[in-house]
Amino acid sequence: MSMKIQFGILNLFLLMIGSVMVVGEEKLPNDIRWIRQSIEYRTLCEQLFRQATVVILRKVKTEKNSDNLAVVVDLDETVLDNSLYQVERWKAGLSFTQDSWSEWVNREEAGLVSGAKEFLKAVRKKGVRVVFVSNRMNKNLEPTRRNLLALEVLAPNDLFLLRLDKDDVKEVRRREVNEGKARMKKVGPLKVVGYVGDQMGDFPSGQAKEFGKTSFLLPNPMYGKW
């Protein structure tokens, strides 16, 4: 076989491989592909967590009483990457349901959002308590803890305020953190020096000017109330 023919066959093979890869990528919606494959998404997350670390630790230095400081952190698409759930639902032609979400949580297969591990390690090192405020149902606390433990982002004194029912909105739980009431009664009131999340509901309302100062918002085009 001549070199020219061999070269032609090789080019055809590479073209076929490339076509399969492109078709495979195009099967996923662009929002999910961006989360799972883009360098831009990973870089934005890492940049946000670095900024949050610098600003929050600078604030910690100015606090006279550092024994009751906390950061309130969302879980899904903030610390835990659930894009595989989105992939599976899309391929099955199905949308979000609470039952399917609960099954996913119990699989304990969520990945880690880039930059989250370093951020959590840095604030804990300065004695700041991590309070996970998530809309995961409280009945799924143990698989959530095991998933975080497997990803090496769980600490013994982390606190969890997961959702009890439809009325148990995040505003209620943030108030419990600040006032040391209800589920936080044994811990007492904590002074929140930072909020991190991926949706506006993860932050106190009416504080738009706090973004970049106390509140830090991660990108998430996959779902939301917008």
Image (cartoon, helix red, strand yellow):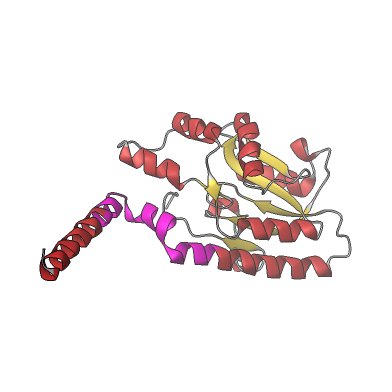
The image shows residue 52 at horizontal and vertical percentages of 65, 65
Q: Looking at the image, can residue 210 be seen? A: no
The image shows residue 170 at horizontal and vertical percentages of 62, 44
* Between 50 and 72, the one nearer to me in the picture: 50
The image shows residue 161 at horizontal and vertical percentages of 68, 40
In the image, taking residue 6 as reference, residue 28 lies left or right, namely right
Residue range in magenta is 21-45
In the image, taking residue 58 as reference, residue 31 lies left or right, namely left
In the image, taking residue 115 as reference, residue 16 lies left or right, namely left
Q: Looking at the image, can residue 185 be seen? A: yes
Q: Main secondary structure of the magenta part?
A: helix
* Between 15 and 67, the one nearer to me in the picture: 15
* Between 19 and 62, the one nearer to me in the picture: 19
* Between 20 and 51, the one nearer to me in the picture: 20
The quarter of the picture where the N terminus appears is bottom left
**Position of 43 relative to 144 (above/below):** below
What residue sits 76% from the left and 49% below the top?
Answer: 178
What residue sits 28% from the left and 55% below the top?
Answer: 21
Instruction: Reply yes or no: does residue 39 show up in magenta.
Output: yes
Image-quadrant location for residue 7 = bottom left
The image shows residue 222 at horizontal and vertical percentages of 41, 51
What residue sits 32% from the left and 40% below the top?
Answer: 91
Instruction: Reply yes or no: does residue 37 show up in magenta.
Output: yes
